[in-house]
Amino acid sequence: MSDNIKQNLFKTDNVVITCSKSGKLTTSLVQYWSDNVLLPLVGNRKCILLSDYWEGQRTDKLYEKLKHLKRVEIPKSTTSMIQPLDVGWNGQYKYFVRQMYDHVRLYDLDVNLAERNNIIKMNSLAYNQMTSPKFKPMGRYAWYQSGYLEDNPGPFQNTQELCFSFGDHRCSEFQCKVMPFVKCSFCAEVLCFPHFFDCYHKH
C-alpha cells in the first residue's frame, strides 16, 4: 500500500487496514492479523483461540508472539455448525451492513458505499454498534448454539430488534426531517443515515 493511499484513508481506531494482491486470505494476512489485531488485543493475558481447519492458519509460528495463547482447532467442515462467529454472529453483522446498502439504494442517496473510505467507515460503524453491551446476550447464545455452553443463556435481541426497530420515531437530531435509519445500540438515539453515517456516529 503506497504512502499516498495510506495518507488518504479514513482514520478510525477500530479497523486495521492492509491489502493483498489476490483479495483472498493468505498465511501472510493471518500473520498480519495476529501481530496487528490479536496481539494488541490480548497482550500477555491467557486466552484460547478457537479457529477452523484452514491450512493457512494452522502453523504455531503465526502465534509465537502470544506467549499465553492456546489455539483450539475445530474439525474440518464443521465451521458452519460449531464456530460461534459463523453460527450466531457473522450473519447479524452482515445484516447491519446490508441495511446500509439497502437504505442508500432505496432512497437513492448520493453515497458511494463501494468507495474505499466509505467501506472502512461502514465497517467501523457496524462493528462499533455490535460492541454495545446490549449484544452480549446474543454472543452468549452463539456459544450455546454451537455446543460450548450446557445451559441456555436465555432470550436475546438481535441486530434487527436492537438497531432497526424504532416504530414511528424520527431522527433525534434537532429539527431533522430526514427519514430515520437506525437506533444506536449504545445511546438509543434514532438517527437518519446522514447523521449516522456522514457524521460518523461512533461510541
Image (cartoon, rainbow, N blue to C red):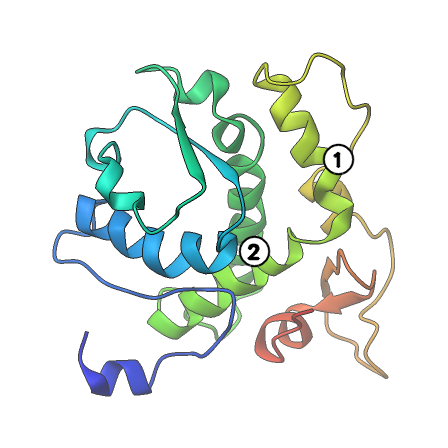
User: Which residue is drawn at the image coordinates 33% and 85% (left, top)?
Assistant: 8
Mark yes or no: residue 164 visible: no
Q: Nearer the viewer, residue 5 or 122?
A: 5
Which label number is shown at residue 127?
2
Image position, residue 73 (x, y; %): 37, 23
Question: Dot 2 lies on which element?
Answer: helix
- Figure check: 107 above or below 90: below
Q: Quadrant of the N terminus?
A: bottom left
Label 1 to label 2: alpha-carbon separation? 16 Å
Q: Nearer the viewer, residue 45 or 188?
A: 45
Image height of 115 relative to 45, above or below: below
158 with respect to 95 (left or right):
right
For marks 1 and 2, the one nearer the N-term is 2
Q: Amino acid at mark 2?
A: Tyr
The residue depicted at 27 percent of the width and 47 percent of the height is: 30
Residue denoted by label 1: 137
Amino acid type, residue under disc 1 in the picture: Pro
Q: Residue at x 66, y 35 (%)?
A: 139
Residue 20 vertical placement versus 56 (above, below):
below
Q: Quadrant of the C terminus?
A: bottom right
Badge 2 crowding class, 10 Å Cα cut-off, few under 14, some 14 to 19, many 20 or more, is some
Q: Is residue 86 left or right of residue 114?
A: right
Residue 56: horizontal and vertical position, in percent? 20, 36
Helix, strand or loop status at disc 1 = helix
